[in-house]
Image (cartoon, helix red, strand yellow):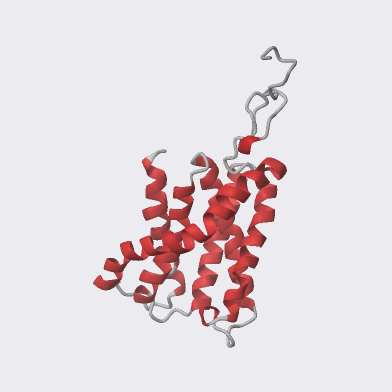
């Protein structure tokens, strides 16, 4: 695994998330406090063992390879993205989502971000040889940056404005990746001479039987 994928997940994407807030800050921007910087690493570790392990082994490590094998990378993104967004919707019935004062559009904007960010994660997952650690770091790196740095750097920004900015950037990134890869999203596919993943035999990998000369 090339080191730059870890750098992208740990530094590149969080830096992009921070810069994303500038056009939406209304001029209220300040340097993050020392406490926010100190909290970055412990916050990342905590989220790896909570958000990362509670979501990515299921969504990406289990579901995504099987969906891609059946529907292709674009079809898998179409299926998995809305499911991932729907899974988060109960958050809008809690204080996290601003219940009961959240505007009805806020869950829709969050769903747009989730669906488009799923495209980005799919591309990273495929390009890294289906690396679960990298996509976990990518996912929780975004969450951790928002929870530790944004409040300090953009004190006047509401959660709704923040999510609009994230959704716009994520949508642009997803569109660029879909166009640049022609919808393949880094998916190598399965060759006819390679057994399919997850233990499924192919025509070129016959099962051992009584007629194959081994008995």
Q: Is residue 69 visible?
A: yes
Q: From where the camera sits, is residue 16 visible?
A: no
Residue plotted at (24% across, 71% down): 34
**Which residue ends up furthest to the top in the rendered image?**
213
Is residue 184 positioned above or below 77 on the image? above
Q: Residue 36, how many percent across, how many down?
A: 30, 71
Q: Residue at x 62, y 50 (%)?
A: 63
Residue 199 as seen in the image, left or right of residue 160:
right
Q: Quadrant location of the N terminus?
A: top left
Along the line of sight, the residue nearer the viewer: 15 or 204: 204
Please give the name of the residue rendered at 69% of the width and 12% of the height, measured from the top-left corner. 213
Tell me if residue 39 comes above or below residue 199 in the rendering: below
Residue 55 percent coordinates (x, y) = 54, 59
- For image coordinates 51% across by 41% down, the residue present is 127
Q: Position of residue 182 (x, y in %)?
A: 64, 42
Marker count (numbered): 0
């Amino acid at each position: 695994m090339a080191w730059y994928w870890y750098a992208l997940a740990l530094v590149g994407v969080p830096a992009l998330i921070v810069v994303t807030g500038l056009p939406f800050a209304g001029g209220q921007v300040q340097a993050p406090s020392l406490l926010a910087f100190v909290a970055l690493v412990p916050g990342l570790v905590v989220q790896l063992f909570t958000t990362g392990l509670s979501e990515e082994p299921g969504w990406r490590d289990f579901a995504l390879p099987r969906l891609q094998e059946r529907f292709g990378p674009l079809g898998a993104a179409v299926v998995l993205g809305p499911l991932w967004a729907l899974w988060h919707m109960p958050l809008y019935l809690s204080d996290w989502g601003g219940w009961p004062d959240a505007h009805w559009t806020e869950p829709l904007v969050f769903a747009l971000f989730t669906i488009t960010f799923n495209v980005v994660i799919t591309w990273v997952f495929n390009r890294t040889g289906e690396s679960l650690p990298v996509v976990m770091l990518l996912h929780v790196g975004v969450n951790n940056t928002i929870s530790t740095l944004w409040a300090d750097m953009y004190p006047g920004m509401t959660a709704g404005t923040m999510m609009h900015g994230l959704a716009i950037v994520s949508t642009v990134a997803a569109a660029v990746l879909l166009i640049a890869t022609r919808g393949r999203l880094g998916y190598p596919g399965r060759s006819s001479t390679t057994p399919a993943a997850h233990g499924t035999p192919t025509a070129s990998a016959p099962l051992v039987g009584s007629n194959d000369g081994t008995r």
